[in-house]
Structure formats: C-alpha cells, structure tokens
Image (tube, rainbow, N blue to C red):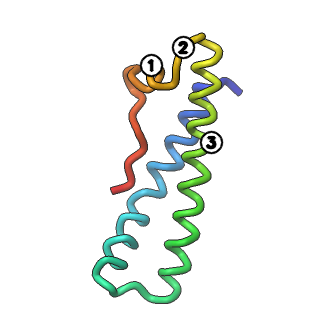
Amino acid sequence: MKLRSRFRITQNMLTFAAPRYRELIHKRQAESLTPDEQTELIARSDYLEDANVKRIEYLTQLATLRKTTLPAIMKEPGLKPASYF
C-alpha cells in the first residue's frame, strides 16, 4: 500500500473518532462522566494516540522517500496536524 494511502486511512480514522472523543472530554470537564464513559474515553485516547503515531510514521517515511523533512511534508496542501478539539 502506498504511503499516501496509508496516511489517508489513518487520517480518516482520526476524523471518525474525534467527535465522540470531544463529547467525552466535555463531559469529563463538566464532571458528568459515567464510569463506562471514563473507560470509553481512555480507550478512545489510546486509539487516537496509536493512530497518530502511525500517521507520523507514514509521514516520516514519505519525507525520507522524498529526501525532505517532516515539517516540509506537513506544509503540503491537504496535510494538517490532527486536531481533536
């Protein structure tokens, strides 16, 4: 699988998981998180962290293939830092 495709898949996973993650964060901040939601929040945090690590690994590999740097790759159109909030 091409690195660009891997990156897009990872980016889509992050986008898919973010709305519920934000909802759980807001509930935690409002101190209205249930024990089950706390467990879910921890699981989603772990998932997003793993997906973001894979994303950075793919982008680093892409930078190496292009003989450039990760910051240079991140400046390309369509690539943006992951944001969950």
Up-down relation of residue 59 to residue 47 (above or below): above
Q: Residues within 10 Å of mark 1 (few under 14, many from 20)?
A: few
Residue at mark 1 to residue at mark 3: CA–CA distance: 18 Å
Identify residue type, mark 2. Thr
The label nearer to you, 1 versus 3, is 1
Residue 1 in the image: state x and y as whole percent: 71, 27
Which label is found at residue 34?
A: none
Disc 3 element:
helix
Check disc 2 and report the residue beneath it.
68
Q: Quadrant of residue 84?
A: bottom left
Mark 3 to mark 2 CA distance (whole Å): 19 Å
The label shown at residue 72 is 1
The x, y position of residue 2, in whole percent, is 67, 24
**Where in the figure is residue 15, as x and y percent of width and height?**
44, 49
> How many numbered badges does the structure rendering display?
3
Residue at the extreme top: 67
Residue under label 3: 54
- Could you tell me which secondary element the residue under label 1 belongs to? helix
Q: Is residue 26 left or right of residue 1?
A: left
In the rendering, at what x and y percent does residue 26 appear? 31, 72
Give left or right: position of 56 versus 17: right
Q: Residue at x 57, y 37 (%)?
A: 56
